Amino acid sequence: MKRYVTLFMRAVGILGAILVGGLNAASSQVVITNSDEPTLYAYCQQFQTLYTQIRQQHITPDSARMQFSGIMRGLQQGFRNNGPYRIDSLERDSLRRTGRYFAFPLRGYTATAIGGTHGEGYRGIGFDLFDYKVRGSHPAQDIFIVDRNQDNLDDRNGQPVDILAMTGGIVLAIETGWQPGSEYRGGNWIWVYDPVMHGLFYYAHNNRIYVSPGQWVQAGQKLAEIGRTGFNAYKSRSPTHLHLMYLQIQPDGLPKPMNPYQWLLTAKLTK
Ligand SMILES: [Zn+2]
């Protein structure tokens, strides 16, 4: 147990150095491997495997739930004894109410790019992360760019649009191999675990991804470039957008979607 925590502390120590030093994305990559201990990176691998199994329906929803909960408890335990991440639920609630904690996830865009006029694109009811067959919910906000010719580039300047991390955290898993014709809806996605909030951010439909599992990212750091990957997102009826979801991990280790709309309204913008 002691060594286990030590490994986390080492990772957190490096994160601290990154925050202080303001290093760029390339040098902030932290991958910790140790064959006989559950490391941060091992949790990333477990999560990636589990999520792939869920998507391919190679695991029953019940055992997926159990494994997921184990990974989340492991991550939480690993960070629990470390100062910056020791946060009680009151503090967490107050963080959530303030925009200062969050970066708007599209560079060069503002809350007016969010689908709908009051964030009504969010539909949390009926969501089940562990059962790929369950459909109909949309526990997320879609944020659209100006891309009428659907070439993944911003019509205003012909440039790709950067997807930025909303908060700091560790990249748990990514998908980079989506191809047109694939039935997978998320396309090229990224999962980031925020140990302060004890929650997961999910960024979907990306084109190119610039981070890898085990890497620490800071709020506002580039994760990817916006794209049209995903079964529905690729279709011409779908305007180019980011699909942004946040899952709050509950005391039992299971995820509950929360509407990130208020955070997006007050998040720090990046030009
Ligand atoms: Zn969406």
Image (cartoon, rainbow, N blue to C red):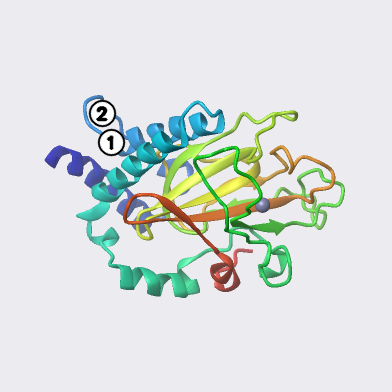
Q: Is residue 27 left or right of residue 87?
A: right
**Secondary structure of residue under mark 1:** loop
Q: Across the whole image, how many numbered discs are drawn on residues?
A: 2
Instruction: Determine the residue positioned at 40% across, 71% down.
Output: 95
Queried on whether the Cβ of the residue with tag 1 lies below 8 angstroms from ligand 1, the answer reads no
Residue with the mark numbered 1: 39
Residue with the mark numbered 2: 34
Q: In which quarter of the image is the N terminus?
A: top left
Distance from Cα at disc 1 to Cα at disc 2: 7 Å
**Secondary structure of residue under mark 2:** loop
Quarter of the image for residue 63 reads: top left
Quarter of the image for residue 207 reads: top right
Q: Nearer the viewer, residue 168 or 132?
A: 132
Q: Quadrant of the C terminus?
A: bottom right
Q: In this view, does 20 lie above or below 56?
A: below
Residue 184: image x %, image y %?
Answer: 65, 34
Residue 243: image x %, image y %?
Answer: 64, 52
Quarter of the image for residue 66 reads: top left
Q: Which of 252 and 46 is in front in this view?
A: 252
Instruction: Determine the residue positioned at 60% across, 64% down.
Output: 270
In the rendered structure, are the residues bearing label 1 and label 2 in contact, judged by CB atoms less than 8 Å apart?
Answer: yes
Q: Residue furthest right?
A: 149
Instruction: Determine the residue positioned at 70% across, 29% down.
Output: 182
